[in-house]
Amino acid sequence: MNDAIETRVLVIDDHPLFRKGVGDLLDMEPALQLVGEAADGESGVALARRLRPDLILLDLNMKGIDGIETLRRLRANDALDARIVMLTVSDTESDVVAALRGGADGYLLKDMEPEDMLALLRDAMRGRLVISPQLTELLMRALRQPPGPSHPDQAGLTPREQQIVQLIAKGWSNKLIARELDLAVGTVKVHVKHILKKLRLRTRVEAAVWVVNARPY
């Protein structure tokens, strides 16, 4: 993705001062435009449906519905194609795994240095999975043994699915994969669903870990 393309950002967090801080941070990056703020999950989902942002920064622990349930509702809306990055204080394994299995495109801790956070948000804009560096080992430990086939020959993936799973492992979004392979985004989504079903996995993150462990193709 070209950095010159402006990315519209929605922040969902129940702390007003933190939302202001995020707004100030985004002002440092011309390619990121804050278009909306929500103080809870319910209003956040409604605002996302109305604004159709490109990137959603979502807190985990909020009053009312929490971040995981908010994430589930956002992902259940086929009309939304936003990248969703969790932005939270929790570094517990269960929270990280639940968020990524729920469809989050990243998991960042709020105590990161501003410059580091902006760098990772730029990566998120390019369609990559973003994780706070200190969580990488935790994530790999949690997902080291995915339940799917352990060897490529057992997976039964078509040549096209093999191409796509390799790009998933690089952290590419459906849009980037579609552009690279000259496919419609909807077609890529269907392929991803078939890949996850064949590998008996639930998320793209687990598929990426499977590629690393299996070293296929």
Image (cartoon, grey):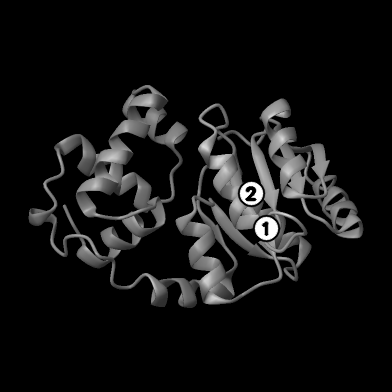
In the visual, does 71 lie left or right of 207? right
| Classed neighbour count for the residue bearing mark 1: other residues with Cα under 10 Å, few (<14), some (14–19), many (≥20) | some
Instruction: Check contact, mark 2 vs mark 1: CB within 8 A.
Output: yes
The residue type indicated by label 1 comes to: Asp
Across and down, in percent, residue 26 comes to 80, 47
Q: How far apart are marks 2 and 1 (CA)?
A: 6 Å
**Which of the pair 149/112 is nearer the observer?**
149
Q: Quadrant of residue 144?
A: bottom left
Q: Would you say residue 52 is visible in this rendering? A: no
In the visual, does 137 lie left or right of 126? left
Query: As displayed, is residue 70 above or below residue 135?
Result: above
Across and down, in percent, residue 74 comes to 59, 41
Disc marking residue 70: 2
Q: In which quarter of the image is the N terminus?
A: top right
Q: Would you say residue 155 is visible in this rendering? A: yes
Q: Please, which residue is most extreme toward the left here?
A: 153
Mark 2 lies on a secondary structure that is helix
Mark 1 lies on a secondary structure that is loop
Query: As displayed, is residue 112 above or below residue 31?
Result: below
**Identity of the residue drawn at 85% across and 48% down:** 23
Across and down, in percent, residue 192 comes to 32, 40
**Which of the pair 95/184 is nearer the observer?**
95
| Classed neighbour count for the residue bearing mark 2: other residues with Cα under 10 Å, few (<14), some (14–19), many (≥20) | many
Residue where numbered disc 1 is placed: 66
The residue type indicated by label 2 comes to: Thr
Disc marking residue 124: none
Across and down, in percent, residue 114 comes to 77, 62
**Identity of the residue drawn at 86% across and 59% down:** 15
Q: Quadrant of residue 132?
A: bottom right
